Image (cartoon, rainbow, N blue to C red):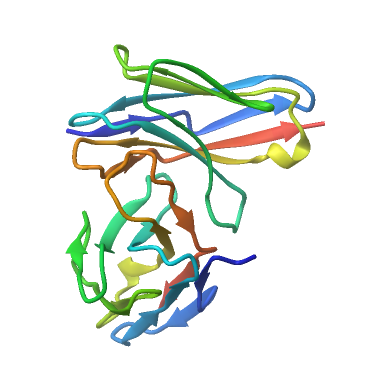
Amino acid sequence: DVKVTQSSRYLVKRTGEKVFLECVQDMDHENMFWYRQDPGLGLRLIYFSYDVKMKEKGDIPEGYSVSREKKERFSLILESASTNQTSMYLCASTSGGTSGANVLTFGAGSRLTVL
Amino acid sequence: GQNIDQPTEMTATEGAIVQINCTYQTSGFNGLFWYQQHAGEAPTFLSYNVLDGLEEKGRFSSFLSRSKGYSYLLLKELQMKDSASYLCAGMDSNYQLIWGAGTKLIIKP
């Protein structure tokens, strides 16, 4: 019954390493999102995509990039990981349209530690 | 600026009722969402309000007052499994979500 799958639940990387976080959804959703979740803060949007090969910056895109080559897959890339990118990363998807009632379906999260 | 405020932590007793409040300031308004997140798990959708009033879904209800920029989530007949964080999110005029930091609800026997 899993609908949004994040490839890695836990990762430990070293400063300067390139990190790929993969997200796949099986609901044929147009919209996909990457958030980070830190204690004491609300979810912060990193990047989102409304269509294949399309991407939009969210509130905190610095240090990140994304790729969406297929509708079901949205990847988050940290070109050179830094310790301040240690966080929980959540992928989410929703169907198209700008209805306010569009509900996000989240993955279980990827907890990244950068040493 | 845009902002969502909710209490950091609340404690309640099994079988009781608890109300989690959320105040919001958004640029325009397209609705207010509540999500539940158990520790180590994905947030899951609980409710969406765009009109004033109370929406009831079983043991959970959500209320919205647009004039006051205020919402609450009401949980009745609390069960131990309700121990979780509850996330409030407002949707602005661009259909972007502004998230609160979440309220951690602790249920005691």
Residue B69 lies, with reference to residue B5, above or below; the image says above
Instruction: Name the quarter where the N terminus of chain B is drawn.
Output: top left
Residue B85 lies, with reference to residue A61, above or below; the image says above
Q: Looking at the image, which is closer to me, B3 or B65?
A: B65
Using the rendered view, name the quadrant where residue A82 is placed. bottom left
Residue located at (32% from left, 87% from top): A17
Residue located at (33% from left, 32% from top): B4
Left/right placement of residue B25 relative to residue A36 reads left
- Return the x and y of residue B13 as percentages of the image width and height: 75, 25
Using the rendered view, name the quadrant where residue A75 is placed. bottom left
Residue B40 lies, with reference to residue B92, above or below; the image says below
- Return the x and y of residue A103 as percentages of the image width and height: 43, 47
Left/right placement of residue B106 relative to residue A106 reads right
Q: Looking at the image, which is closer to me, A23 or B107?
A: A23
Instruction: Name the quarter where the C terminus of chain B is drawn.
Output: top right
Residue located at (68% from left, 27% from top): B58
Residue B44 lies, with reference to residue B70, above or below; the image says below
- Return the x and y of residue A32 as percentages of the image width and height: 35, 63
What is the total number of numbered labels drawn onto the structure image?
0
Residue located at (72% from left, 33% from top): B107
- Return the x and y of residue B20 as percentages of the image width and height: 53, 25
Give the residue at the far bottom of this rendering: A17
